Image (cartoon, helix red, strand yellow):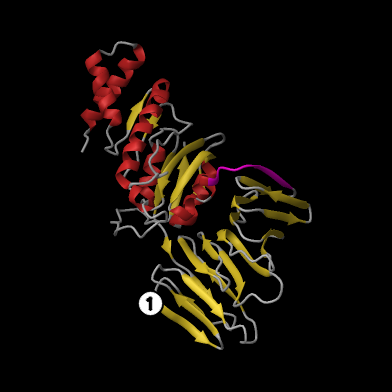
Amino acid sequence: MQNNSTNERYQELARKRLSGAISPEEAGELAEWLARDDGHPLEVPPEVAEDFARHEKKIRAGIEKRIGRKSPVVRALRLTAAAAAVLLIITSGYWYFQSGKPVHPPAITVKSNDRLPGGNKAVLTLGNGRQIVLDSAAVGTLYNQGGIQAVKLDSGCLAFNQDVSASPLQFHTLSTPVGGQYRIVLEDGTGVWLNAASSLRFPSSFMGNERVVEITGEAYFEVAKDVSRPFRVNFNGNTVEVLGTHFNIMAYPDEEKSKVTLLEGKVAVSNPAGRRLLQPGMQALIGSTISTRRANVEDAVAWKNGYFIFDNEDIHSIVRKLARWYDVKPAYQGDLTGLTFSGTISRYENVSGVLSMLELTESVRFELTNDALRVSR
């Protein structure tokens, strides 16, 4: 484990490199440390950050070789508001992505005045009013009555279907709390991932010539293709129309605009203000009007894959994401205008780990007391 004196040594080498006073031996020592994957931070002058980025590629390649696939979790955490560039190689979480989807992390010890990350938590409210707490439910059939069946799979997700001859058709609601997430496979085979503080209202079976669901909060869809029955998602007075595609909808009430991000296929986004078609890699920004732009797709679906990505993101937006996942109540002190950050952090870190990484910039401070989070410069 690297100690403070070792870290100070490499800060000194970085300063020598910047001034041109570094010897060949010292330059080799610095390069060797930069190429090493030891997961520890080094604070360096901003002028050498570009050089560090080249070494970051070497580190990424080493990790990808070890896990046998490309992984987005290994990258530098560049904090744009920092007085100094901070290189944070986050290696502890890379194994979450070996299978291409997040897995349950090992048990995490809760430190004093800390918060655990969220997890698979949801409540299924059936059309008859019955509620089933899914996070504590055993694997197997949860409900089987009147031709309607709900099954919790080994993967932890919910599979739902109804015998087409059963009647009457019922609408059910899957809801996640703050600090929760869940996945459901609908009767037609469509997969839906719900983020924290979100809900999905859906029929037990899709009948007629269309498939319609409604969401609040944030959800990622992988829609089963059925040309004869378009799939529609309603949210906040808006509609997304698809045939078969992969897309993400972010529609939290505390966000200024809703966002629809298309990964695959084609969708139409419409509301009383108009209608826009999206191609893969595009994002619709929805407020009083609908506008489109190129999307950071990796950023949009990071939550589903088990990590946070901040791409020149405002501190208030970042804290809102943390509040939903760690169930904290933020309060702001002072003027934080213009404070933005970029980087990648595992969602399976305790909140103290995420806050500590952001504080390394020396441009923001956090004070956590129980579930109250104070944010200041």
Magenta part of the chain: 290-297
From the image, which quarter does the N terminus lie in? top left
Q: What residue is rendered at 57% in x and 60% in y?
A: 221
Residue 199 belongs to magenta span: no
Where, by quadrant of the figure, is residue 75 drawn? top left
Judge the density around disc 1: few (<14), some (14-19), many (≥20) Cα neighbours within 10 Å: few
Horizontal and vertical percent position of residue 285: 67, 47
Q: Residue furthest front?
A: 227
Q: What residue is rendered at 56% in x and 34% in y?
A: 338
Q: What residue is rendered at 30% in x and 53% in y?
A: 112
What's under tag 1, amino acid-wise?
A: Ala
Q: Is residue 227 above or below residue 255?
A: below
Left or right? Give the position of 263 relative to 212.
Answer: left
Disc 1 is placed on an element classified as loop
Horizontal and vertical percent position of residue 244: 62, 60
Horizontal and vertical percent position of residue 27: 27, 18
